[in-house]
Image (tube, grey):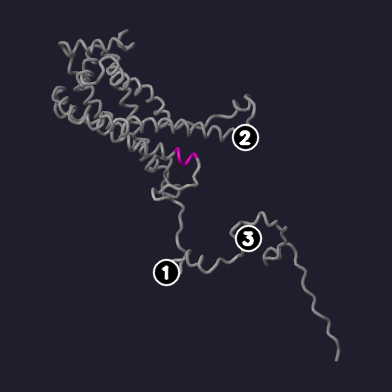
């Protein structure tokens, strides 16, 4: 009986080893091992039951709270949602405001008649409780969250590129400003001037806003037509375009949000661009038709109320110079 030579094992190169799962790796220390694997790879039986449903399939788990807000999100996530949901709340006031300053005057074709409806609906959003919750706080949250989000992204960019000196910081550009954001920053001084002239100034001068109505606006159009028509047109058009494109952003309807897997991406983007601008143009025209076409042409208010209006407008620098 002859001795047969023992078979020799093939020598595996790196490519073969990688295919067969024999790649050599460096050992990792125990401290780097995830905590869920330190006590053993396989979970206990009770833990396994908790992760399965009654069909034996993996149970869907979530870390969200009862309000649907997770507890491990970063500043960008929170600031974006504050900006989003505050705009929804402020939209309630915007709907009332468009109805009072446009739709109702267009239907009644009379400022005194429209004032009656204004007095009926105004307490719902100008009361002591409703105005801070529906108007002031959502508007403040929307503006501050947008500014804070921009500053935070600027800080992230500086940290990402390691900017330390002032020269380095100047060489790194700020985050790109979208058209919707640019409209928002443009709207801020226009809306602030409107709030100051119609809410803050009468409260400061007369102690309340009981005399402020659509007649106060029409009186300003009659006394100071150029500034009133230009300012009102700029305020309305900027606000409507900002609201329209902002709402489209939250609903995923902007042109840059078209899926790249669509059959005709360019055509879909063009349709959305023209559609959004068309909607904004219709709303703007409707608002200006009631504001300029009815309220702007109602004429000045006479009597002691007209004198009160003149006193208020004399405290407005632009109106006083005109």
Q: Which residue is more in the foreground, 142 or 261? A: 142
The quarter of the displayed image where residue 186 is located: top left
Mark 3 falls on what kind of element?
Answer: helix
Find residue 289 and report its horizontal and vertical position in percent: 22, 26
Q: Which residue is found at the position 62% from the left and 24% from the top?
A: 166
Image depth: mark 1 or mark 2 in front: 1
- Which residue has dot 3 on it? 38
Q: Are marks 1 and 3 in contact (CB under 8 Å)?
A: no
- Which residue has dot 1 on it? 54
Q: Quadrant of the N terminus?
A: bottom right
- Which residue has dot 2 on it? 161
Relative horizontal placement of residue 178, taking residue 291 as reference (left or right): right
Mark 2 falls on what kind of element?
Answer: loop
Residue 89: numbered disc: none
Find residue 292 and report its horizontal and vertical position in percent: 23, 22
Query: From what the image shows, is residue 287 above or below residue 215?
Result: below
């Amino acid at each position: 009986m002859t001795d047969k030579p023992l078979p020799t094992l093939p020598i595996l190169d790196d490519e073969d080893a990688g295919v067969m799962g024999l790649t050599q790796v460096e050992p990792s220390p125990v401290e780097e091992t995830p905590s869920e694997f330190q006590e053993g790879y396989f979970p206990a039986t009770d833990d396994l039951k908790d992760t399965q449903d009654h069909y034996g399939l993996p149970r869907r788990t979530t870390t969200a709270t009862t309000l649907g807000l997770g507890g491990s999100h970063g500043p960008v996530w929170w600031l974006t949602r504050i900006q989003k949901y505050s705009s929804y709340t402020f939209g309630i006031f915007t709907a009332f405001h468009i109805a009072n300053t446009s739709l109702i005057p267009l239907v009644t074709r009379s400022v005194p008649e429209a004032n009656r409806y204004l007095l009926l609906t105004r307490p719902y959003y100008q009361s002591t409780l409703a105005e801070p919750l529906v108007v002031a706080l959502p508007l403040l949250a929307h503006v501050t969250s947008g500014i804070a989000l921009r500053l935070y992204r600027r800080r992230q960019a500086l940290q990402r590129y390691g900017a330390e000196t002032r020269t380095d910081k100047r060489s790194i550009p700020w985050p790109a400003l979208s058209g919707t954001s640019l409209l928002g920053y443009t709207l801020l001084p226009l809306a602030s001037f409107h709030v100051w002239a119609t809410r803050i100034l009468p409260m400061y001068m007369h102690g309340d806003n009981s005399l402020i109505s659509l007649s106060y606006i029409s009186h300003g159009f009659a006394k100071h037509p150029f500034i009133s028509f230009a300012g009102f047109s700029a305020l309305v058009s900027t606000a409507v375009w900002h609201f329209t494109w902002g709402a489209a952003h939250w609903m995923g309807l902007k042109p840059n949000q078209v899926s790249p897997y669509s059959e005709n991406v360019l055509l879909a983007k063009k349709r959305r661009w023209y559609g959004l601008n068309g909607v904004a143009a219709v709303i703007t025209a409707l608002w200006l038709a009631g504001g300029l076409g009815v309220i702007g042409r109602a004429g000045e208010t006479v009597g002691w109320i007209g004198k009160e209006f003149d006193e208020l407008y004399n405290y407005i620098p632009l109106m006083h110079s005109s």
